[in-house]
Image: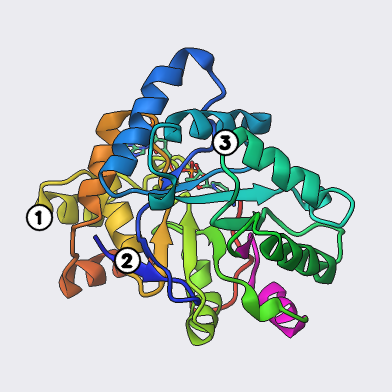
Amino acid sequence: MKTIHLPDGTEIPAVGQGTWYLGEDRSKRTSETQTLRWGVENGLTLIDTAEMYGDGASEELVGHAIEPLDRSKLFLVSKVYPWNAGRRNIFDSCQDSLDRLGTDYLDLYLLHWRGSVPLSETVACMEELKAQGKIRRWGVSNFDLSDMQELLRLKHGENCAVVQDLYHLGSRGVEFDLLPFLHRQGIPLMAYSPLAQAGRLRQKLLSSAAIQTVAENHSITPIQVLLAFVLAQDGVFAIPRASRVSHVQANREAADIVLSAEELALLNEAFPAPNRKVPLDMI
Ligand SMILES: NC(=O)c1ccc[n+]([C@@H]2O[C@H](COP(=O)([O-])OP(=O)(O)OC[C@H]3O[C@@H](n4cnc5c(N)ncnc54)[C@H](OP(=O)(O)O)[C@@H]3O)[C@@H](O)[C@H]2O)c1
């Protein structure tokens, strides 16, 4: 599988597992646990969660799923609410996430989105969490170019390891200026909603003739094309969410699909990247 190098040299798989909405319905616990474990055992060792998801229920599900697994082989990501991302709350928030996950460190801790806590305070706290061994590294989410420029001017801002933003074939705004900037800084982009939420985020995406043609070329589904497209971009990795084994299997398969230059051109023509600045897309 394609891998991504973090700024500190750590190599991680380019496809991980998202968990938004997972853990919220107790009756799905067995199948969701099986899905996450199947993913990990087949190389999708990065799991993305957040204190927000199900008010901690998603972190608890992940904790349950990974209990019998080798922690050292996992890459666990969680996120702090913006209003908890200051000196008053972040240390308790992080500990609560660790407790729910049943682990003593996070591989990556993200500021979920920007709020009113000064960025400099969040960065200083993130660095303290690192020094305490509670997190290995930190990053940000839902940040646009101007946010990143501001962040990188702060003390220790250059330690930002990852930016997690919305990115899929039907929403390519980050390609205009943010992605090239991150490239120059050596910071990878973790694409969230890479499947456009199974097409729901953009009308008629999955029925497009271009996507259908590419899917037929490789005998895969249109959704697998969406994942292959995101992974074809330099410095991009993705965290599709699946709640059933058949879907995580399909996502694992898509990680090995290489789109040809002609296929990428076809997709570009049908869903061009904007040639001007557009507001950062987020959900
Ligand atoms: N930082 C942020 O603000 C932010 C925002 C949104 C999301 N995220 C993260 O990114 C993750 C992914 O984004 P997302 O959950 O919004 O959407 P997504 O991954 O784009 O799409 C998830 C949907 O796709 C379906 N699916 C998954 N694999 C499939 C396959 N191979 N074939 C057909 N359908 C498939 C899932 O169905 P089933 O559930 O039935 O398998 C689910 O309905 C989240 O779970 C979360 O961890 C972060």
In terms of depth relative to the viewer, which is nearer, 154 or 125? 125
As drawn, the label of residue 282 is: none
Q: Amino acid at mark 3?
A: Gly
Residue 242, given in percent of the width and then of the height, sits at 38, 36
- The residue stretch that appears in magenta: 138-154
Residue 263, given in percent of the width and then of the height, sits at 19, 66
Residue at image position (44%, 35%) is: 66
In terms of depth relative to the viewer, which is nearer, 280 or 76? 76
Total numbered circles:
3
Q: Is mark 2 within 8 Å of ligand 1?
A: no
Residue at image position (57%, 30%) is: 60
Secondary structure at badge 2 equals strand
Q: Amino acid at mark 1?
A: Asn
Residue where numbered disc 2 is placed? 3
Kindly report which numbered mark, 3 or 2, lies closer to the viewer in this rendering: 3
Q: Amino acid at mark 2?
A: Thr
Secondary structure at badge 3 equals loop
Residue where numbered disc 3 is placed? 102
Secondary structure at badge 1 equals helix
Q: Residues within 10 Å of mark 1 (few under 14, many from 20)?
A: few
Residue 282, given in percent of the width and then of the height, sits at 61, 54
Marks 3,1: beta carbons within 8 A: no
Residue 18 on the magenta span: no
**Between marks 2 and 1, how big is the CA–CA gap?**
24 Å
Residue at image position (47%, 12%) is: 27
Compare marks 3 and 1 and give the one earlier in the sequence: 3
Residue 149 on the magenta span: yes
In terms of depth relative to the viewer, which is nearer, 55 or 254? 55
Residue 272, given in percent of the width and then of the height, sits at 39, 69
Horizontal side of 35 relative to 91 (left or right) equals left
Location of residue 231 with respect to 91 vertically, above or below: below
